[in-house]
Amino acid sequence: LANLAGNDKITFDERAEFTEKNMENIRACVNDPFGENKWWMSLDDPFQALATCYEIVAAIDSGSPETYESSLPVHMDGSCNGLQHYAALGRDRVGGKAVNLCPLDKPQDVYSGVMEEVIKRVAEEADKFLDINESDPDKLTKNERKALADHRAAKLVNGLIDRGVVKRTVMTSVYGVTYIGAKKQIHEKIEEKLEDRGVDVDEIEDEIFAACGYLARVTMDVMGDLFQGARQTMNWLATCAQLITSQGQPVAWMSPTGVPAVQPYRQKQPYTIVTLLQTIVLINNSDNLPAHKARQTSAFPPNYIHSLDSAHMLLTAIEMDKRGLTFSAVHDSFWTHAADIDEMNDVLRCCFIDLYKRPLLEELKEAWELQYPSLNFPDLPEKGDLDLNDVRKAPYFFQ
C-alpha cells in the first residue's frame, strides 16, 4: 500500500508503519469509497490502492490474517532497471550501489541523487559573477556568449528543479535518449512549473527553450559522471555497432536465452504518387534496403540491454513455473501472490546472478569476431569490483 501511495523510497519497516498509521483511513475508504473520506483518491495509484485497502481489511476481519487466502497480485519493481543491468554487466560497484544492487539499510533513489547534483551545479552557475561587457554583443567571443547563455539559463531554472524534472531523462538515458529528447522532456516540466508561478511562458518561450537545453546538458553530464561504468559499456556497444554497420550489415546478436535479434532499421525509400484527387506517399520497407547506419548505432546499446532484461524476466518466469508458482510481469515489474513474494524475490535474485555470471560481453565479441573476421573490435571495457552475490542480500534490488 505504501508503494502505491508513493512512499516507495523509505524502508520496509517504515512502509508497514505508514499502513498501520492509516488504518482509520483504510477502513473509511472501504466502508464508503465515495463518502466524506476520499483518502484513497489522493494516492499515486488510487484504484490499485483502493483494491489493496479492501484486501487488508478483509484479511484483518477474517480473524486469521496469516492464513487468509489473498487473491490480490503483489508486484516488485526494479530500481531504474536499465542501470541495474549496466552495473551488473560492468561490475560497477558505485553504479550498483546507486541502484540497490548492494545490501543497504535504506533504498537508494538514483533520481534524487542526480537531482541533488544537478541542483548544485545549476545554483553554482546562477551565483557566478561574470565580468563580461554585454553592451556590444557583436564583440563577444564564442566562449563569452556561451558563458552568458549558461548563466542566464541557470538563473531562469534555479529553484525549479525537483525529482520530477530529471526523472524521465535519467530513466531513459540508458535506453538511448538523445539530447533533443532530454530537452523536450525537461521543457514540459519546466513550463508547468513556470505556469504555476504565474509566468507568461509564451512571452519568454525562447529563453525557456534555451534554458531547458542547458538543463538537459547538465543532467546528461551528471549521469555520465555518476555512472561512468555504464557510460563505458554503452560507448563500447555503440562503437562495435558502428563497425558492423560500416560493412553495410544490420547489428545482430543472440540473446542469453538463445533468441536471435536483428535490428530492423533500414533506409526507407518513400515514393510519391500524384493522382487527380490526392497525393499518396508509399514507403518501401523491404529488408533488402541498405541499413540505416546512424539508427543501427544509436539504437543498439538500449536494444541490447532490453534483450538482457527480457532474458532476466524469462528466466524468472521459467523458474517460477518449475516451482508451481503463479507469475506475471511487465518489463521490470514482477507479480505473484502475496504468500509467494518471498520465494519470488529469491528466484529473481538467483536468476539475475546466474545471468550475469556468464561472460556476456565476451560472448558477444567472440560471436562478432567469427562473423566479421576483417573487423578489429575494441577491447572490452574494464570491469569493476561489484560482487554479484551481494544482490542476493540486497533488500531493495526489487521492491
Image (spheres, helix red, strand yellow):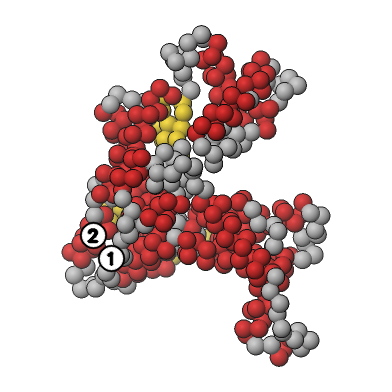
330 or 278: which is nearer to us?
330
Q: Position of residue 398 (x, y in %)?
A: 43, 39
The location of residue 332, given as percent across then percent down, is: 43, 42
At horizontal 80% and vertical 58% (from top left) the residue drawn is: 199
Q: Where's the N terminus, which quadrant?
A: top right
Relative to 264, is 77 on the left or the right?
Answer: right
Figure quadrant of residue 87 = bottom left
Q: Is residue 51 above or below residue 350?
A: above
* Element class at badge 2: helix
* Residue on which the image places disc 1: 380
| Drawn side of residue 114 relative to residue 327, left or right | right
- Name, please, the residue furthest toward the top: 63
| Above/below status of 66 relative to 160 | above
Q: Is residue 11 above or below residue 186?
A: above
In percent of the image, x 68 and y 27: which residue is there?
39
Instruction: Read off the residue under disc 2.
Output: 362
In the rendered view, tell whether residue 341 sits above or below residue 109: above
Q: Earlier in the sequence, mark 1 or mark 2?
A: 2
| Extreme residue toward the bottom, this view | 139
